[in-house]
């Protein structure tokens, strides 16, 4: 996420750190680089101008020139302004209304709106402990209603049935009545996407909005559309009065233009950010944490929160006891660790939040992708229970059988066995109480052990 912007700013800041002191001249050079980095990231020009102007005003003053560490002071200013541009703090959902709190979802076709409805439903259910119902008012896109029904089953929330021959406004009204009768806390209304901002479809969603009187009207937009995302959100806001924005597909956005443009152009807060295809891949949008990621400083707070939410404490304790008794770390244990990593968003998500991950060698970055985890799990799944418990017995013919069963090569099996040996050695070091300390660290906000690549 935001790799190209992070890389470009990283080079600029590296040069600044090498300066014994900062002058107006080298600050101007740095500001020029920052300006180019933002433009290349597809940040809207008015936003870039305003951003650079504010940084210049602070940087050329005493705050930086007289600092003992002027390079770091400049980076701090850029970080503060990035945070301010994106909205300072996370703005939560306004759910303190008479139930059900209606959340209306709007957006263009292809932005991932229906999937985002399911992601938000899961987040409300699991993180906010709300009872949730979802309904589709999209009577145009083939199978849109069935898609939401399938996703509702996946995230285990109630689905209100609708049909393509119904009027979208009637669907919304009936769903609200049903949610009220069933004492639901929140009702999420999915609306039809549109290819562009056209009058007829805007009139329809305005009618739904008037009938539903939502507590939140959220605009779902593809972050990869850059500054166009902000412009489209502005057009919708004029028609609907949005309460916030959800940026989707941020995991595929190497630039970051949308995240940096939306708040300035629309005046509306980014409330959530979608970071993957899974229904778990939705995060509340914290401007300070995103600024930290952009500047290559990671996001340890989000990483710890993710670990505490998804790390299986019971399995971790069992592993600690097992290793402490000297029973070793077998391939079944490795599989559990890989599954834990998957639950935390995979290797790419972890690396995105680790400080300094941007400076990792290209070779390691190339290996650090989620397909590797799936491949390793497939290899272990192709083994017998006996082989998983006693990896030392896996020799030539067994390796060939395992490779064939998992659709991999023998060298992939060899690589996995070698990685397991390395992790097993590491676990032995913890056998005198170290694992227990590591698990306790997790309870206190630590991060699970090494990445298997």
Image: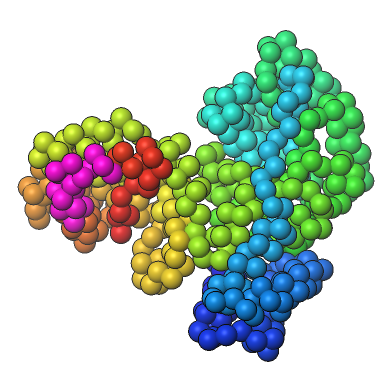
On screen, residue 54 versus residue 445, left or right, reads: right
Q: Is residue 127 magenta?
A: no
Q: Position of residue 237 (x, y in %)?
A: 85, 46
Q: Nearer the viewer, residue 253 or 430?
A: 430
At horizontal 72% and vertical 59% (from top left) the residue drawn is: 85
Report the magenta residues as a range.
422-438
Q: Position of residue 258 (x, y in %)?
A: 70, 59
Q: Is residue 303 visible?
A: yes
Q: Nearer the viewer, residue 438 or 343?
A: 438
User: In the picture, which quadrant includes the N terminus?
Assistant: bottom right
Tell me the colour scheme of the image. rainbow
User: In the picture, which quadrant includes the C terminus?
Assistant: bottom left
Quadrant for residue 359, please give it.
bottom left
At horizontal 82% and vertical 53% (from top left) the residue drawn is: 266
Q: Is residue 168 visible?
A: no
* Magenta stretch: dominant secondary structure: helix
Q: Position of residue 3 (x, y in %)?
A: 55, 66
At horizontal 9% and vertical 53% (from top left) the residue drawn is: 395
Quadrant for residue 201, please give it.
top right
On screen, residue 21 versus residue 413, left or right, reads: right
Q: Nearer the viewer, residue 289 or 173?
A: 289
């Amino acid at each position: 996420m935001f790799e190209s912007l992070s890389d470009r700013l990283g080079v600029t800041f590296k040069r600044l750190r090498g300066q014994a002191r900062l002058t107006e001249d080298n600050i101007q050079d740095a500001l020029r680089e920052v300006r180019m980095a933002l433009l290349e990231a597809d940040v809207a020009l008015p936003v870039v101008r305003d951003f650079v102007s504010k940084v210049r005003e602070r940087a050329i003053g005493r705050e930086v020139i007289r600092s003992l560490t002027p390079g770091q002071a400049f980076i701090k200013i850029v970080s503060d302004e990035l945070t301010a541009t994106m909205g300072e703090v996370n703005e939560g959902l306004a759910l303190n209304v008479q139930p059900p709190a209606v959340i209306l979802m709007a957006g263009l076709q292809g932005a991932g709106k229906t999937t985002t409805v399911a992601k938000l439903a899961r987040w409300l259910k699991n993180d906010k402990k709300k009872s949730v119902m979802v309904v589709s008012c999209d009577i145009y896109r083939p199978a849109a209603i069935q898609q939401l029904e399938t996703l509702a089953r996946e995230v285990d929330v109630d689905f209100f049935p609708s049909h393509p021959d119904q009027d979208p406004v009637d669907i919304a009204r009936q769903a609200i009545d049903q949610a009220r009768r069933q004492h639901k806390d929140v009702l999420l209304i999915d609306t039809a996407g549109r290819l562009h901002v056209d009058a007829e479809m805007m009139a329809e969603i305005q009618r739904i909005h008037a009938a539903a009187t939502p507590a939140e009207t959220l605009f779902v937009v593809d972050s990869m559309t850059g500054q166009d995302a902000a412009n489209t959100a502005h057009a919708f806001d004029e028609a609907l009065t949005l309460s916030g924005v959800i940026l989707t597909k941020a995991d595929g956005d190497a630039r970051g233009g949308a995240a940096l443009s939306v708040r300035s152009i629309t005046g509306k807060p980014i409330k959530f950010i979608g970071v993957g295809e899974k229904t778990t891949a939705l995060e509340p949008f914290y401007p300070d944490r995103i600024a930290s990621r952009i500047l290559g400083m990671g996001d340890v707070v989000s990483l710890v929160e993710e670990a505490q939410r998804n790390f299986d404490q019971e399995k971790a304790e069992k592993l600690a006891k097992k290793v402490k008794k000297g029973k070793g770390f077998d391939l079944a244990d490795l599989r559990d660790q890989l599954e834990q990593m998957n639950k935390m968003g995979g290797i790419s998500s972890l690396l995105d939040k680790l400080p300094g991950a941007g400076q990792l060698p290209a070779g390691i970055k190339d290996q650090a992708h989620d397909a590797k985890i799936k491949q390793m799990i497939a290899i272990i799944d192709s083994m017998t229970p006996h082989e998983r418990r006693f990896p030392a017995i896996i020799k030539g013919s067994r390796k060939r059988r395992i490779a064939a069963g998992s659709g991999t090569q023998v060298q992939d099996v060899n690589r996995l066995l070698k990685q397991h040996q390395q992790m097993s050695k590491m676990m032995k070091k913890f056998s005198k109480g170290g694992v227990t300390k590591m698990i306790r660290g997790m309870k206190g906000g630590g991060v699970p052990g090494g990445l298997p690549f």
